[in-house]
Image (cartoon, coloured by chain):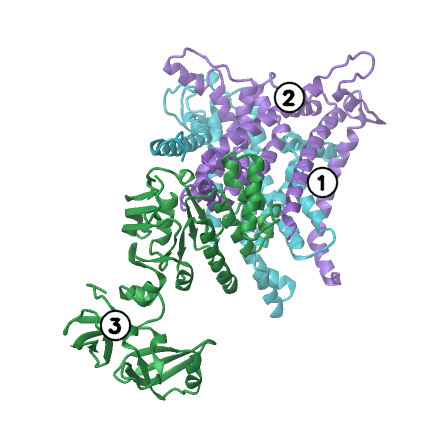
Chain colours: A cyan, B green, C purple
Amino acid sequence: MGTKSPGPGWHRFFRTLSKRALLLHGILFFMFIYLPIILIAVYSFNSNPINMMVWKDFTFDWYRTIFGFSAGLTEDTMYVESTDQLIRAIQNSLIVATTTTSIAVVMGTATALAVHRFKFKLQRFYQGLMIMPMIMPDIVLGIALLIFFVGAGIKLSVVTIIIGHCTFLISYVFIIVSARLAGMDNSLEEASADLGANEWVTFRKVTLPLIMPGVIGGALLAFIISMDDLVITYFIAGVDSTTLPVFIYGMIRRGVKPEINAIATLMLLFSFIVASLGLYFRSRKK
Amino acid sequence: MTATVPNSNFVEIRQASKRFAAPEGGTITALDDLSLNVGANEFITLLGPSGCGKTTLLRAISGFEELDAGEIFIDGQPMVGYPPHRRPVNTVFQNYALFPHLSVGNNVGYSLDIAHVAKTERNKRVVNVLDLVGLSGMENRKPSQLSGGQQQRVALARAIINQPKLLLLDEPLSALDRNLRQAMQLELKNLQHELGISFVFVTHDQEEALTMSDRIVVMDGGSIQQIGAPTDIYDRPNNTFVANFVGESNLFHATVSEVSEKFTEAVTDNDIRLTVENCGARTGDKVTILIRPEHLLLQAGGLDEYASLSGTLQQSIFVGTDFQLIVKLTAGGTLKAVIRDSARQAASGLAPGTDITFQYLPSSAHVIPTRAGT
Amino acid sequence: MRPTKRQTLHLSLLLGPVTVFLGIFFIGPLTIMLIYSFLEPGLYGGVEWSFYHHNFGRILGWADGEWEDYNPVYIRIFLQSIELALITVFFSLLVCYPAAYWVSRLPDQFKPFFIFMITLPFFVSLIVRLYAWMLILRPSGFLNTMLELVGFGEKSLDLMFSSTAVIIGMVYVMVPFMFLPIYASLEKLDMSLVDASSDLGANKFQTFRRVIVPLTLPGVVGGSIIVFIPSLGNFVIPDLLGGAKVVMIGNLVEQSFLYARNWPFGSALAMLIMSTVLAFLLIYMTWMSRGQTVENIRG
């Protein structure tokens, strides 16, 4: 140890300092992530319609407004569009999400099984094909689909949205189920075949139960992403077939209103519940 | 201050204590007020079962563990508060810890690169040390391309290139197969002599300790059970733990019945008579007597000096170099004997159930000092 | 081993639907977009089926006909978009790396909880998360209101509708994408290597530079790519947080399609985005495979 090297005191100080700094960064990080979200939720109960961030009173008014109950609000504080549109947007989102999830789960799982089980010439090609929608920027995919639908004369509707969502959600399911398959013990399937079961029975009784956590995980992920999708839906939704995110985007573009806080908070709640369910299932099945 | 006499206090560990929180609650004492001196140019081994504190002690010396109490001095300098990178100590890790993204040459030269040693000098030293460990020309290989034995040598080379005052080795040979391990043991011993650096070697393998060490420190439960040269540890263990941990043992708890001019006789509770050389014990004293299996002889000759033990053969196990005989003593209790060399012939024909009498020299029996609780 | 007839049948059953679906609704649209980028825009929207190179020409700045001067505005916007995307990657890295390091050093029982908490916002719609920042950054927003309370005067910080606001928004949205790959590579890091580095005389900075950074680089690069791609083609964030002041290439595409009704030009712009993304991916993959081949030589 040279004469110019710092003493033990300095080392202790530095060690504690770096630990504290790291902890501080961690705390700030979490605050950064959650503060905005908490703000929306908190201020959705703020009765101040003009200076939305200045707290006036606690109120449920905005929640009531969006569902059509204009509880004691005067004309100039009520900006929200018709509740019908909101309800329809929610309905469309749910229809799209459930249908997309069903299709994507079936096709994604099928592809994952095919790529995992069989060694065939085009294996690499299919793996690449599955990755492509995920690495493509949303906007490119969105306008490509728009051109396609309009060019083919297909009217933009819930169906086109479903198709659009499927194109990339199949990939998400594929990735998750593939990971699950890769971690699975192949000898179980072989044992089943050895005991006389044909492929379908083996799949039903052995493979499927084993990959079920992956399938469920993929389904939940696809559901959430479909519910939340903005960009692609923005381009391929028809006039009558807005989904919730696109509807809100439209609302925001026309001006910031307290009702949006209420809708946003409800969406937050919904996402949290679904995500927690997903976590619950994943930890249980392990 | 250059000492002309070899510095026997090159490393001083004074009353080191360390406690950890146990997962179930409470604390585990890893080091219990432990004091130890290591000499310059000495090969010393910390030997003990898992959890005895040997690795904790090693990490305390290298700076990865901070002691709750006690101090460590290296070459007269206190180490308290100094992190690992500031201590003149290098470690060979159990899993080698070779940097996978660096070549062998860059792994070995790492400490020189950190110290900004000039390139030509640095490269020269890397080549030299690789020659020393028998890996000439491997500078550009990656660790993943090497065998276990080769990786071990790289770890060694990396740790000695900077000429540390002390080298710590944390069970470095445990991952190697038997033959390779034995070859490496000799190489390490020779290396230590050549380098003149003190080696502190940690292992749970008593054979390894006996082979390589100048001195062995037998540890258990965070404290030192015995320190000594390998022959001392083996022939004259201080307590039953050391007797059992190092080598095989036949232990008898007996009371001294008669002290004569040369020999002392003691009797166990179940009437086994044992003869040992006089050791200062008086009639009525309780003693523990150790007879190593290899000191029990079949038909040594009818000289008066030999005492004997008799029983019935229960099992005869052939292990290549010797026969291991498990014998049930007439008076009760089990004896283990190891028969080698010329007596093997006699041993090979023995069948279970045969009556056997062993003979032993009283001088080969060792009286373990009886401490409270041993 | 050549597949049996039975296997081929099963394979076709499994892969058939996907192939058809993606072929029609994924490959197809992209191909048409490629074609459109070379077509001439019709007078009232729609297209003329004739080869028209001026779309790309216009992007590069060249005029279409005598009444347009050389105007590199599109190239400029494109380069600014790349710049904003790179800045976003940089700040995401700055924000996420220490946080990922901190979580990876926590006791094992806490880690799943923290990972869940960090990924949870990912499940909330983009629009909600962006709206939150609108509320914060507006002149009458949360930030200014708080500053007012502390005594800074009314509406002191004018962050809204600036590239700063856009970057904040993009970093906020991209954090889960940057965090997870970095965290994964930190988890894989063998701590005994950090100990070995210390043991050999390296202080914390040296250990970080020589051991931790190289070994977590795959995670960093992976995360950067995952963040760069959506950042480049983004239009929602510049629209809401940047307004008219911040125009990214995504905005141009949106305008071309929904307002200017010049689909060929919009397609050309989209092709530009896509080629940039593919170029970066290609670089990434060659870099990755180069590292692999060195590792795979068995001595």
State whether discs 3 and 2 lie on one chain: no
- The front one of C218 and B74 is B74
Tell me the residue that label 1 is attached to: C25
Pair 2/1: label in front: 2
Pair 3/2: label in front: 3
- The front one of B243 and C57 is B243
Tell me the residue that label 2 is attached to: C80
Chain name for mark 1? C
Which quarter shows the N terminus of chain C? Answer: bottom right
Q: Residue furthest front?
A: B4
Pointer 1 local density, CA inside 10 Å: few below 14, some 14–19, many at least 20:
many
Q: Residue furthest right?
A: C50
Instruction: Using the image, determine if residue C107 lies above or below residue A48.
Output: below
Chain name for mark 2? C
Mark-to-mark CA distance, 2 and 1: 32 Å
Tell me the residue that label 3 is attached to: B289
- The front one of C242 and B81 is B81
**Figure quadrant of residue A2:** top left
Q: Earlier in the sequence, mark 2 or mark 1?
A: 1
Mark-to-mark CA distance, 3 and 2: 88 Å
Pointer 3 local density, CA inside 10 Å: few below 14, some 14–19, many at least 20:
many
Counting from the top left corner in percent of width and height, residue B112 is at 51, 38
Pointer 2 local density, CA inside 10 Å: few below 14, some 14–19, many at least 20:
some
